[in-house]
Amino acid sequence: MSLITIGNAGQEIGSTDYWDSEYALAGKCFVSINAGCIRLLIPELMFHIMPEIETGKKIIVSRGPWPAESRTNGLGMGCFTSQNVNTGTWTKSRV
């Protein structure tokens, strides 16, 4: 897959070619970080996850080795939602 171009405007995304990219067309979300802000781009194919995402209370981001994938560096993100914030469980994903 090809590179994604993002034109930054501080924490806002001024422009991007993500929406027409192979990633978006395949339904893959994309994370972009700039100016102290983590920005999650969600393609139209994944809009059905929006109701769950909107219940998010906290997000945990960690970086480090990812032995399960034999990688020396990985980024992990987890989200506490209204359904799991009181139980201490969280939804995990790897980027």
Image (cartoon, grey):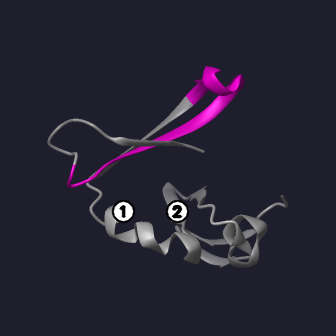
Q: In terms of depth relative to the viewer, which is nearer, 56 or 62?
A: 56
Tell whether position 78 is magenta: yes
Residue 83 placement (x, y as % from top left): 21, 52
Q: Furthest-left residue in view? A: 86
Majority secondary structure of the magenta segment? strand
In the visual, does 92 lie left or right of 4? left
Q: In terms of depth relative to the viewer, which is nearer, 60 or 91?
A: 91
Amino acid beneath label 1: Ile
- Residue found 58% across the figure and 38% down from its top: 75
- Residue found 52% across the figure and 69% down from its top: 46
Residue 10 placement (x, y as % from top left): 56, 69
Lower sequence index among marks 1 and 2? 2
- Residue found 36% across the figure and 62% down from its top: 53
Q: Which residues are magenta?
A: 64-83
The mark found on residue 40 in the picture is 2
Amino acid beneath label 2: Leu
